[in-house]
Image (spheres, grey):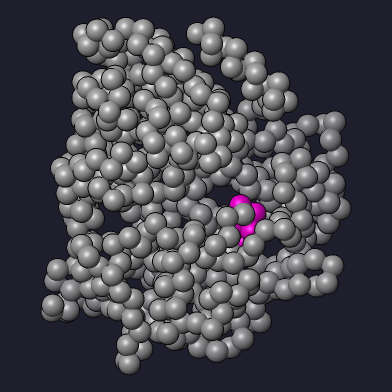
Amino acid sequence: MKRILALIAVLCLLTGCTAPQVSDPTVGGVVNDPSIPQTVPGEEKGELRLPYNRDGSFQPFTSGDVNNRCLLPLIYQGLFTYDREYEVTPILCKSYQVSTDMRTYTFYLEKATFSDGQQVTALDVEASLRAAKNQGFYAGRFQHVKTIDATSDGSVVIKLDTPCENLPILLDVPIVKASQVNDPVPLGTGPYLLEDTGDGKRLRRQPVWWCDAELAVEAQIIPLYHGTTQRELWDLYKFSGLSMVCTDAYVDFRGDYELWESENGMFLYLSCNMKSNVFSKKAIRSALTHAIDRETLVNKQFRGFAHSATLPASPEFPYYSETLAEKYGYKLEKFAQAVTEAQLEDNNVILLVNRDDPLRTHTALAIAEMLEAGGLAVTIPEVSGQDYINALKWEQYDLYLGQTKLSPNMDLTAFFAEDGDLNFGRISNVASNALCKEALANSGNYQSLHKQVMEDGRICPILFRSYAIYGRRGMFSLLSPSRDNIFFYTLGKTMETIRITEEIQE
């Protein structure tokens, strides 16, 4: 315990951190501070102003900048999108067919147009999906895709290496012109066009948009204000009339605002080294879940902007079983009993974390205290950057605290396939890997998969992170943010009405 407290003190000195002074708003609530002016430039006339990072990228397939990615749904559209409950809705897809073995999907397109008036073609869709498959942001969700091909009849055919019941949830990928997939800002089919004014950037509403939808924003011109740090964004909000701020951590904003949260897909978890003296024992691995007080981590470390997840899926996911989750919840005495029965009291375990991430480091410290309360001793080594990656590859840990962006269908293949990107020990887990594929083929199998994962204990889910979205009161009455899509909207179509029931015969 002394070792952990000392480490906290060192971290505070290194990062200059102090305990944040946090007010207590509710989501959608109001916070008023009479010491701060309630009127700022532009607010009187309700001008919409949004943040962006001029040093970041707007390239839809590679950009990782939070502020810029928040604007992408206003510029681009995918074949599909999905709401905060992960219900899929069609956008650029007019209709689709699925083969009897669920390995081949055929998508037919709406008569949609890009911002220059040219019609979207199957070749544009093929090129966009291929670019997304081969580049950063979306790459993980294409691991089961074998081929993507435009056909002579104007459709797009996707073939998979395993049956997949719900491929459309993965296809919210922005569709751009085939000739522009590598451009820094390719043209899109969304309601706004990004323009460079010489002094900065702005969004301009399309005078003729190919579709009709009720949007959370209706301004003809949206000036964009550069800001990157929380301090810069707060100053813009306070002094320059910025209308909205999106951040992945709670900020002590003051004044009058509405507050939303939306998942960003970032999954925080513990993973066990199967060769560890302690966690090679299944009884200890499967009991690890009972040592983690997830609600405390969500509230204290993440200020409420995360969802505790006992199972390896978002609690918002339709196939997350609360009943099953209760079985694996926080019960420290169960973990302590497993440690005692295995005669492992005071055994030292190495908990690896990337020290480049202060929030994850503080979370690791809190987890270390929980494990020590359960009877183990914990050491957190000073590793970051490439040293952290090397320690993972060489399995120089008993546990590591990891973070990854799970695909919207909560596919866990990367953890359990022998060549999976997150299977650092390269240890085959035939049962879990098989259940991963069964869950993709039939969503009713997710409960069996989650039960197997928790009983095996190789990974211990902790939480899913969220964005905090601050907006000026009354400016965003229609805002209904979903994962990675603050400005979510639908076109009124449903998956049932656009599916061609005559199946493709393979």
- Vertical arrangement, residue 387 with respect to residue 71, above or below: above
Measured from the top left, where is residue 422 in percent x and y?
36, 44
- Secondary structure character of the magenta stretch overall: helix
Which one is nearer the viewer's eye here, 238 or 460?
460
Q: Nearer the viewer, residue 157 or 416?
A: 416
Q: Locate residue 157, reporting x and y percent.
A: 30, 79
Would residue 442 be found to the left or right of residue 40 on screen? left
Q: Residue furthest bottom?
A: 152
Q: Position of residue 438 (x, y in %)?
A: 17, 52
Q: Is residue 267 visible?
A: yes
Asked if residue 505 is among those painted magenta in the image, a careful observer would answer: no
Q: Residue at x 21, y 8 (%)?
A: 341
Residue located 44% across and 44% down the image: 404
Q: Is residue 59 above or below residue 293?
A: below
Look at 72% across and 49% down and name the residue there: 228
Q: Position of residue 277 (x, y in %)?
A: 28, 20
452 left or right of 358? left
Residue range in magenta is: 66-71
